[in-house]
Amino acid sequence: MTDDPPPNPALLPAGFVDLLPSDAEAEAAGMESLMRVFASHGYSRVKPPLLEFEDTLLSGSGAAVAEQAFRLMDPDTRRMMALRPDITPQIARIAATRLADAPRPLRLSYTGLCVQASGGARESDRQISQAGIELIGLDSPEADAEVVALGAEALAVLGVPGVSFDLTMPPLVPALIAEIGYSPAERQALMRALDRKDAAAVAKLAGGLAPVLTELLHAAGPAERALSVLGGLVLPAPARVLSERLAATFAAITARVPDIRLTIDPVEFRGLHYHTGVCVTVYARGQHEELGRGGRYMSNNDEPACGLTLRPEALLRAAPARAGRVRVFLPAGSDPAVGRRLRAEGYATVDGLAPVADSRAEARRLECDMIVVDDGVMALN
């Protein structure tokens, strides 16, 4: 009989990773760059807790992410708690309680970690970072446009190439289908076909609505073409209102960011169960994952709101690598004033804590790029 070997101490649960120095530093710098963009447009930063009572965190808009939440019991109160799978519901709670009397529209920004019960954008991701904005208390195309414009500016600051924003209107297809007396089974089958973008199945299942839905399926793509198709369709009044709002939001976005790349998918509704208006998903050329998503919803106390949540891990995979700080070795006995000057100039200094026979070899061992010699800085060859 043999004992099982002890687990490797580096082994982590599936979906959780250690970020080592270069990656951790790049993520922190990237997130702070995002937050500076948000702050420059008047978005005030808040920091909700990682853990809340389940009945608070997962109510309202939080109900849409309840299946993604880890739960545990508070040993003090014996009440169930949940680790947040998404920060947006917490922002809605803060706006409706602690900031209920703040002037509207309320502009808030946030960054932090979330924990999901299963993978997010990638199957291996269960601990994810989020950085985002919420604009609460105003329902207008201009508000939607502000959120998208800030997302575009933030991604430009990170240098992400080939960014595109895909606009959708999740209530549009339900508004169309509601006009037809489908049975529950027929409705479910049709929605499944639309979700799969299966034009043949839609034509078979949609009956008299088939021509309109087929046109919408084929309209997905560049925004101008999609809006032209929508504008030429005869739609019932509720769907027409939604179509016109989508067009107004497009116009407001392009007025703010004329060179933005926009696409529209009129029949997309996946994963956006609590959204009530225009939504957006962010992509980048050559990347197979979403960089972020957001849209319009009803916040707590039935306040209109819109927001955008970005995924820093995905953004940094899409952005060009950022050079870290140049590391300068300060041999033991160096003048402290030299180190202060170098740090003020943006260098990272590494102090030698004891005399060594070969300072250059020690600097290379500590992965430094330069060394201080006679109060001057020299490159290590």
Image (tube, rainbow, N blue to C red):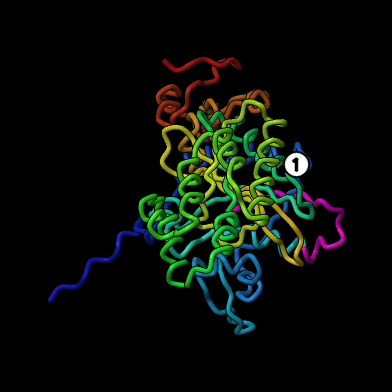
Quadrant of image for the C terminus: top left
- Of residue 252 and residue 257, the one placed in the foreground of this image is 252
Residue 344 image position (x, y, % from top left): 68, 26
On screen, 8 above or below 293?
A: below
Amino acid type, callout 1: Glu
Residue 330 image position (x, y, % from top left): 55, 26
Residue lying furthest bottom in this view? 78
In this rendering, position of residue 11 left or right of residue 270: left
Secondary structure of the residue carrying tag 1 is: helix
Q: Residue at image x 64%, y 65%?
A: 61
In this rendering, position of residue 250 left or right of residue 128: right
Q: Residue at image x 52%, y 73%?
A: 71
Mark 1: give few (<14), some (14-19) or many (20+) Cα within 10 Å.
some
In this rendering, position of residue 240 left or right of residue 267: right
**Magenta stretch holds residue 293:** no
Residue lying furthest left in this view? 1
Residue 232 image position (x, y, % from top left): 59, 40
Residue 57 image position (x, y, % from top left): 63, 69
Q: Residue at image x 57%, y 31%?
A: 261
Which stretch appears magenta?
96-112
- Of residue 198 and residue 337, the one placed in the foreground of this image is 198
On screen, 283 above or below 355?
A: below
- Of residue 177 and residue 292, the one placed in the foreground of this image is 177
The answer to whether residue 294 of the structure is visible from this angle is no
On the image, numbered disc 1 is attached to which residue? 142
On screen, 226 above or below 243?
A: above
The answer to whether residue 326 of the structure is visible from this angle is yes
Residue 64 in which image quadrant: bottom right
**Magenta stretch holds residue 97:** yes
Q: Residue at image x 63%, y 55%?
A: 236
- Of residue 256 and residue 222, the one placed in the foreground of this image is 222
Quadrant of image for the N terminus: bottom left
